[in-house]
Amino acid sequence: MSAEPILFPRDTQAGPARDAWWRDAVVYQVYLRSFADGNGDGIGDFAGLRSRLGYLKSLGVDAVWVTPHYPSGGADGGYDVIDYKAVDPVYGDVEDVRGLVEDAHGLGLKVLLDIVPNHTSDQHAWFRTALADPDSPEAARYHFRPASEEPPNNWQSMFGGSAWSRTPDGRWYLHLFTPEQPDLNWDNPEVADDFDETLRFWYDLGVDGFRVDVAYGLFKDPQYRDNPGVYSPTLFGHGPEQVMTTNQPRIHEIWRRWRAVGDSYENGRMLVGEVSLADLKQVGLYARPDELQHAFQFRLLKSKWDATAFADTIAEALTVFASVGAPAPWVLGNHDKARQVTRYGSLRRARAAALLMLALPGSAYLYAGEELGLPEAEVPDAAKKDPIFFRSGGARAGRDGCRVPMPWDDHDALAGFSAAGSAAPWLPIPDGWRDHAVNRQAADASSTLSLYRQAISMRSLYPALGSGLGAVSRVGDVIRVDLVARDGDPDPVTCWINMSGSAAFVPARRVLLASDRTGVQERDGIVELPADTAVWVTPNSVDLR
Ligand code: NOJ
Ligand code: CA
C-alpha cells in the first residue's frame, strides 16, 4: 500500500438494516466456563454471568456473546453438543437463559448464543442410534462410509490426524475436529429442519442472535474426493487445500434460510458466522444482505505486529465488505488464539491495537479479559484440557492459556472468580493474576480497563468512530485511518498508530484519546507519537471526496 489513502465508500445497504444495532456494535465474548462462578463449584455459569452484567454495562458494550452452554461431552470446550435445546446443568437451566436475556435487555444489552451446526457430540442421541443401527434415519444424518482398511480419503482433522475414525463395527465416520465431534450431513434435509427448530427455540426465549461455529463448513464434497496434496489444517485461514471440505457452494442456501428465520421475528435477529477462509472475497459473500449479518474474518487476528500486514488487511477487508454492503466485524482476540499482550510482545502494543480496532468502520468483538490486558496464562501441562494439546502429542500448546478464569477482585484468593472457600477453578489461576483484577483497574484512570471504557464511550460521542466511511493509508510503519460519520456529523476523527520502533510526528489539532499518554506530546499542530502507541485525534483537515 502506498502513502496515498485508499478510500472506502459509505456502505450501500438500503432499508432498515442500515441503522440496525449490529452495524457498529461492540460485542463482548464471554467464555462462560471462565467468566464468573455463581455457585462455588469452580466453573463459570449463568448465575455468575448475570451477576456481572452491570460490569458489561459500565464497559459500554452493546451485546454479549456466550460460548456454548449446551450439555456437552466436554471433548472440545463445549463445541461437542449433546442436546441443542438444553443447558448443561453445570451452567444452570433454560430459565437462567431466559433470566439472562431479561436482565440484559433491561440494561439495553443484546444476547447472542453460540450454535454448532457442523457437528454434534458423539453422545448426541442421533449419533448413538446411528452407531447401533447403520440403516437408521439417524445414521443418514452423519457421514458414514463402508468398512475398509484405509480411511475413505485424505481429509484431515483441524486438530491433527485423519478426519475419519472407525465405529466398533468397522465403518468410518467423518469428524473435521475431534473423533467425539462427528460431522453432520447437511445434504440430508432433516438436519436443516432440525436446526430451524433449534433457532426458534432460543429466539422464542428472547435471544437476539447466534454466533455460528464453523460457518464456512457444513457441506462436504458429495463424492468424497481427496483434497489436493498433503495438508495439515488449523483453525484459521482455510485455503484451496481444503476445497472439498470447506466453502461448498450450497452453504449459502443455509445462511439465506437462517436469515429468513431470524427476519420472521419482530425487529429481526442477528447471526455472526465464523468464516475463517483465507480469501477475503469469499468471506464477503457470506455477509450479503440476505445471509449472515456479520462474517468474521481472522486475518487481522492472525497478523503479527507489522504495519504492512495490518494496513493491507484493513484495506482489503473494508473493500470486500463494502462491496456487499455489509459492515466489517473486527476481532483481535478470541478463545482460540493466544492473547494479544503475549502475541504482540507487550501490553503497550495490545492497547494501541485496541484503539485502532475500536476506531475502524464496523463492529468490534472483544474477548473477555482483553479489556484487562491479560497476558496468555501459563497453564501446566497436567492441568491442560484442550484437545489440540493432546491430539498433537503436546507439540501444539493449545488454547487453555487464553481460557483461564477472569480476575475480578484482588482481595480474594480466587481472584473473585468464585467466592472464598469454593472448589478449585477448572483451570488454575496463575500467580499474580490478581494484579490484573477489575477492582484494581476500575480505580486507576490509566489502566487498560479505563482505556477500553473511554474508547467505547467515545464511539457514542463521535459518530465518526466505527462509522461507515473511512480512508486508510500507511507511511512506513505508521498507519493513518481517517473517519467521518455516515450521518453528516461534522466532527471527523483520525486514528494514528505507530508500529515502528521509534517516535513519529503526526499532524493533529487535538488528541482525543491515547492508548498510553506517556511520551505523547502536542505542539503547534504536531503530535509526537511514541513507538507502539495509537491516538485518536481531531485532524487538521480531512480530504474524503
Ligand atoms: C471453532 C471454535 O471457535 C473452536 O473453539 C472449536 O474448537 C471449533 N470451532 C470446533 O467446533
Ligand atoms: Ca459454577
Image (tube, rainbow, N blue to C red):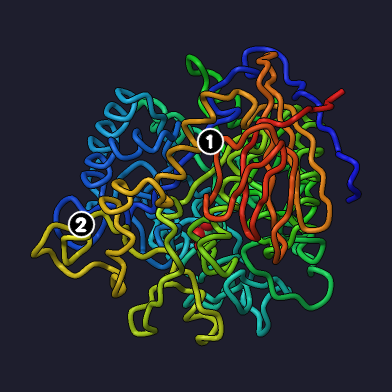
Asked if residue 135 can be seen in this view, the reply is: no
Element at label 1: helix
- Which quadrant does ligand 2 occupy? bottom left
Residue sitting nearer the eye, 466 or 65: 466
Which three-letter amino acid code belongs to the residue tagged 2?
Gly
Residue sitting nearer the eye, 178 or 266: 266
- Contact (Cβ within 8 Å) of mark 2 with mark 1: no
Describe residue 19's horizontal placement relative to residue 336 as left or right.
right
Describe residue 257's horizontal placement relative to residue 178 as left or right.
right
Determine which residue is flagged by label 2. Answer: 416
Is the residue 115 above or below the residue 80 in the image? above
Q: Residue at x 73, y 54 (%)?
A: 504
Determine which residue is flagged by label 1. Answer: 193
Q: Residue at x 66, y 21 (%)?
A: 491
Is the residue 128 above or below the residue 487 in the image? below
Residue sitting nearer the eye, 225 or 46: 46
Are there few (<14), some (14-19), or many (20+) residues within 10 Å of tag 1? Answer: few
Q: Position of residue 259 (x, y in %)?
A: 60, 28
Cα–Cα gap, marks 2 and 1: 43 Å
